[in-house]
Image: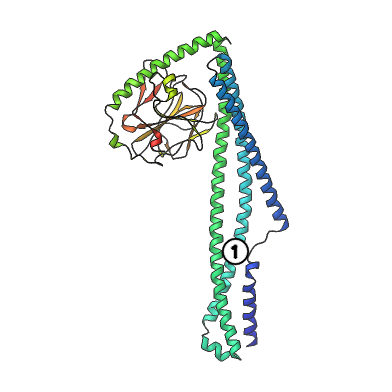
Amino acid sequence: MYAYKHTLVVSVSFLMGLGIFMSVPQTPAHAIEADDLKKTIEGKTKELEAINTELKKTQENLNAVNAKGKSLTQEVKKIDYQIQQLNLGIKSSEIKIDTYALEIQSLDASISDKERAIALKQAAVASFLRDLQERDREGTLFLLLKSKSLADSVFESQAISDLNGKLNEEVRSLTETKTALASNLSEVAGKKNSIETEHKTLKNKRSISEDQKQDKKELLASTKNQQAIYAEQVKALEKKQEAIGEAIDAIETELRAKFDPSLLPIKRPGVLKSPLNGAPITQEYGATAFAQKAYSTKFHNGIDYGAPLGTPVMAARDGKILAVGNNGKYQYGKYVVIVHDNGLTTLYAHLSKQATFAGNSVKQGQVIGYIGNTGYAFGNHLHFTAYWSDSVLLKVLPTCNCGAVPVGVTINPKDYL
């Protein structure tokens, strides 16, 4: 009798102290390591904030240059600022990659702690279950008969009740720890994907920077570094662009006559996702004030997002790549067209670089290119157009030798964002 009671008392004592024992305290060395990681991550975050401040200043300088009109000097300054912006973007990508790696290291430590805690909790739960199973074989009457006194039998019954309560508590804690572990593992997977994406972005930003340097070299060579020659080139470009705009307008006017709005999805937010997270809209859809001055059609057939050169551009919805093209110095420059499953097709124009190929299937949020100012563009931005899919054509225009140009019945993208 004494041996049995002693065993039960030890079990209850173990349970009462379990709240302390079951937690896995960090050793001082572990705590210091975690603290150092946190400080290093905070330092990287401050570096990113400083770079973002510099990027904003560079963008302000670019805006100021664009506002002064077209001249060879201004164009060279613009390219120089764009290269500076890209260099900052490259540094930003490098810091992001380092930060993601540090965050993964921190999460790995947290995962190890949770795995140890789960192992201890599982062992405790198994022990509780064995104890309860043993006690369950002994009914209340048997406990009363074998006890020396009523007090002893009450103690035994209370111990079983405590054991059961503590088991429920440990099972709940185990479930919570497993949920937290799953969240940590998911977060690690997400950050690993972010590192992979950022490595691609870094590689493309370096490539875009080299392209900008080559553009500057070609500009100076073609103009022989003379303003008069540059002015003639700009005049010829604008005249040709006006003819292109008129040709596109004629085609799209004909297409609009066959337009059936009932075939479009119901206007509501969330049908399309913004192709640039957090980027401001710098020009709306329609007969904007800028369109009245800049375009022969007096109409802007999409919305513009302003962002630094080399910023990743994402697919607005799942779909299939219809075209990856380049209009050179005219119209949309480097562009991507995606056909979606709901009667909409989207255009991403003025890119510095494309990151996909015709025929590819893409997911919403997948990077398909990078912000630029190719084609007939005024500063770095993304031109984003939504079309009625049944109307979309890729036309080779007789007015220019600039490859296939996307045309179709346009819709305000904001109706679906």
In this rendering, the answer to whether 411 lies above or below 395 is below
Quarter holding the N terminus is: bottom right
Report the number of numbered marks: 1
Taking 343 as reference, is 103 left or right?
A: right
Does residue 177 appear in this view? yes
Furthest residue in direction front, as rendered: 289
Q: Where is residue 100 drawn, in percent x and y?
A: 60, 43
Q: Nearer the viewer, residue 302 or 204?
A: 302
Give the quarter of the image for residue 85.
top right
Classify mark 1: residues with Cα within 10 Å, few (<14), some (14-19) or many (20+): few
In this rendering, the answer to whether 135 lies above or below 120 is below
In this rendering, the answer to whether 235 lies above or below 273 is above
Q: Where is residue 204 drawn, in percent x and y?
A: 55, 31
Give the quarter of the image for residue 225.
top right
Does residue 129 appear in this view? no
Q: Where is residue 314 drawn, in percent x and y?
A: 47, 36
Q: Where is residue 72 drawn, in percent x and y?
A: 56, 14
Kindly identify the residue that appears in the image at 65 percent across and 82 percent down.
6
Quarter holding the C terminus is: top left
Q: Secondary structure at mark 1?
A: helix
In this rendering, the answer to whether 296 lies above or below 39 is above
Furthest residue in direction top, as rendered: 228
Q: Nearer the viewer, residue 326 or 271?
A: 271
Kindly identify the residue that appears in the image at 55 percent across and 35 percent down.
200
Which residue carries the number 1 mark? 119
- Indicate how the structure is coloured in the image: rainbow
Tag 1: residue type? Answer: Ala
